[in-house]
Amino acid sequence: MSRYFHFTIGPVQGFVAQARRTKDFWAGSFLLSYLSGVAMIATKKQGGEILFPLPDNEYLGWIEGQKSGEPPRQGNIPNRFKAEVTDKFDAKKITEAVQQAWISLCESVWSADLKHFDGTKTREIWDRQIGSFWEISWAISDDKAVSNLLDRRKNWRTHILPPEGGQKCSIVAGFAELSGVDAPQSEALKKFWRELKVKNKNFDLDIKDSEQLCALAFVKRRFTRYFKDFRTTIDGYDICGWELDSNVPSVALLAAAPWLAAAIQKAPTQKINALVEASKKASNKGAALIKLKCIDDASKSKSEISKDIFGLDGMTLFESTFESEKFDKGAAEAMKQALRDLKKELDDKAPSPFYAILLMDGDELGKQMSDGSKQEAISKALNEFTKNVPSIIKEHSGFLIYAGGDDVLAILPLEEAFGCASRLRAHYEKVFKSAKETNGVQTSISAAITYAHIKTPLHGALAGSHHLLDNVAKEGTGRDALAIQVVKPGGVNNTWAQPWEIALQEGSLEEIAKNYQKQIEGGHYSNSFFYRIKEIGEIVSSFADEGDMVELLAAEFRTGTNLKQDDAKKIITPLLNQCLPRFREIDKKPNKWKKGQINADGALIVKFLAQKGVEG
C-alpha cells in the first residue's frame, strides 16, 4: 500500500538570513539544501520515490560520492519535499540521517579548528547549539492529493530553543558566542578569538577581528575549508562532501564591478595595474579570485593586465573606505590616487555604492499541487527552470545564492538586476508553457529588486526584500508583478511596483532611466524635476486625469529648455505610465487592474537608476 511522506527542515530565515556577508547567505542556503538532499537520499534508501519537487539526481549523486559533471556550488534542493513510500517506511530514520549528517559535518570543523577546547565550556556551547538547532517536521498520509499537512504540523510548534546567556554572537541573534566568557570586551574574550586566528589557517579571511561567533555562524564561515574531506556513514551508506569554491563576491565588489569593467576598457593598462597593486597594499586580507563576467570580458582585450584584478577587495574601490584610521596612511593615499586617476578616464564618474538583491518566487503553485493531475507537469517545469537559472545569473555578472523549485535569490550589480529579473521571468513562462496548455497549470512568477547601499546591513536588506516580494509584489499588486525599492543606510527611501505586463512595456522603468541618464549627462534639465513630480502629483492626482497630468508635467519638464510641449509630452508619457500603480483584482474573472493615484517614487527610482545611486 502506498503512503505519502511530507518532509521539511527549518528554520529557513533563522539560518540563512542572519548574515553579515554574501558568503553567510550562500553558506546557509547551501547547507540547508545539502541537508534536504540527505533527507531525500535517506527516503530513497527505504524505497521511497520523490514526487515533488523532482530531485536533481546529479546533485544527490555528489552527496553520495558519485561525482558526475561539475561539482555543485549552489543549493538547488528546497527545504521541503513529498515522496511516495510503503507502509513499512520509518520516518524517524530520515530525521536521524539529517541530524547525523549535520553533526558529523560540524564535527569536522570542530576537529580542525577547535579540538583543543575539548572538555571546556566552549564544547558545551557547541554541542548545545549544534545538537538542538534544526526544526525537522514530517507527516504521512494515505491521500496523495493532500498538500497542507506540513503547514498543519507546524502549528504544533514543539521545537522551541531555550534562551542563552553569555556574550551574544555577532551574527545570529540570541545565540552565545563560543568563548563562554561573560564579561563583554574582556581580555579573556579577545584572547580566545586572537589565539584562534593564530592557530588556524586562513582564519582572518573567514572571521574578522571584531567578530565573535556562535557555533552556527562558525560552521557557516569555516565548513568549506574541510568539506572536500567530509565523509560519514549512515545506516550502511556514505554521505560525502566535495571540493567547494568558497570565494563569494562581496556586495562592494558587485556594486563596483561595472565601473571597474568600464575602467579596464578605457584606461591605460598601467593605471589599472597601479590600482591593483595599491589595493593589495591597502587591503588587510588576501585576494580571493572571483571572475565576474563584466570584469572578465573587459580584461580579455588587455593581456598585460594583472591577474590579481580578479582578487580585489571591493571596499578598496570606494574612497570613503579610507576615511577610517585603520589603514596605513601611505597605502590609503596611494589607493585614493589610483581611484582618482581612473575616475578622470571615466569623465569623473565614481563607482556606484549600490548593489541589487533579486528575490523571485512562483505564484500560487502550492494550491495547484493539491491537484494530482498537475503535480508531474509542475515538477518537470520547475526542474527545467532551476537548471538554467545559474547561467542566466552569471551572464548578468551576478552571484547566485540559491535556486530551488520556484525560488531564486541572487545578488547582482545595480545595472544588471532589471534585465536579469525579466529574463528569468521569461524563462519561467517558457518552461511552464506546456504545463499550462496540457495540464491547466496556472502560475506566474513575482520578483523583488532591492537596491541596497553597501553600508546597509545585509541581513536587514534581505529581510526587507522578503517583505517587498510577499507584501508589495504579491499581495499588494496581485502577483505576476515586479516590485523595486531603494534602501540607504537610513532605511527604505522609495518603493514602486507594477504587474510585469506594465513593467515590461515599451518605456519600462529601466529604459526610461537610460533615456534620462542621457538627458542628465547632456545638462538638458535639473534633477529637481523629479522632486517636482512628487509635489505636482500630490496636489493634482486626486482630481486631474492622466491627460492633464501629462500636460502639467511636460510643462514643468521643458522649463529652461528649448523643448516644445509635444516633444516634452512624448518624454513624460511613459514615465507617468510607470508612476500610476495598477492593482490586480485577483477574485474577479477575468483578472482586472485598478489604477491608483500617482506614485512619485517611480520617478525618484528613475532618477536613482539614471545616476546609479551616485548623487551629483
Image: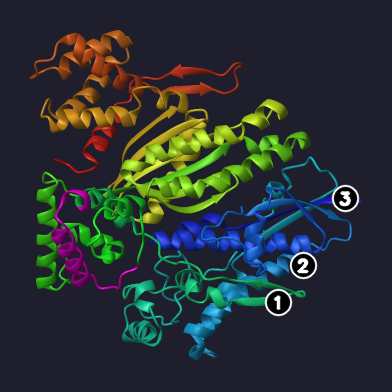
**567 versus 316 height, above or below:** above
Q: Which of marks 1 and 2 is nearer the N terminus?
A: 2
In the image, which disc is placed on residue 233?
A: 1
Near-viewer residue (310 or 435): 310
Asked whether disc 2 touches disc 3, contact meaning CB atoms under 8 Å apart, the reply is no
**460 versus 546 height, above or below:** below
Which segment is the magenta one? 264-288
Q: In this view, does 398 lie to the left or right of 381?
A: left
Q: Name the residue under label 2.
A: 93
The residue drawn where x is 88% and y is 50% is 2
Q: In this view, does 37 lie to the left or right of 473?
A: right
Residue 597 image point, x, y percent:
36, 19
- Work out how far the residue at label 2 is from the one at label 3, CA to CA, in angstroms: 18 Å
The residue drawn where x is 37% and y is 55% is 458
- Of circles 1 and 2, the one toward us is 1
**323 versus 578 height, above or below:** below
Magenta run includes residue 285: yes
What is the crowding at mark 1: few (fewer than 14 residues within 10 Å), some, or many (at least 20)? some
Near-viewer residue (275 or 148): 275
Asked whether disc 3 touches disc 1, contact meaning CB atoms under 8 Å apart, the reply is no
Q: Name the residue under label 3.
A: 2
Magenta-colored segment: predominant secondary structure: helix
- Work out how far the residue at label 3 is from the one at label 1, CA to CA, in angstroms: 28 Å
The residue drawn where x is 53% and y is 85% is 111
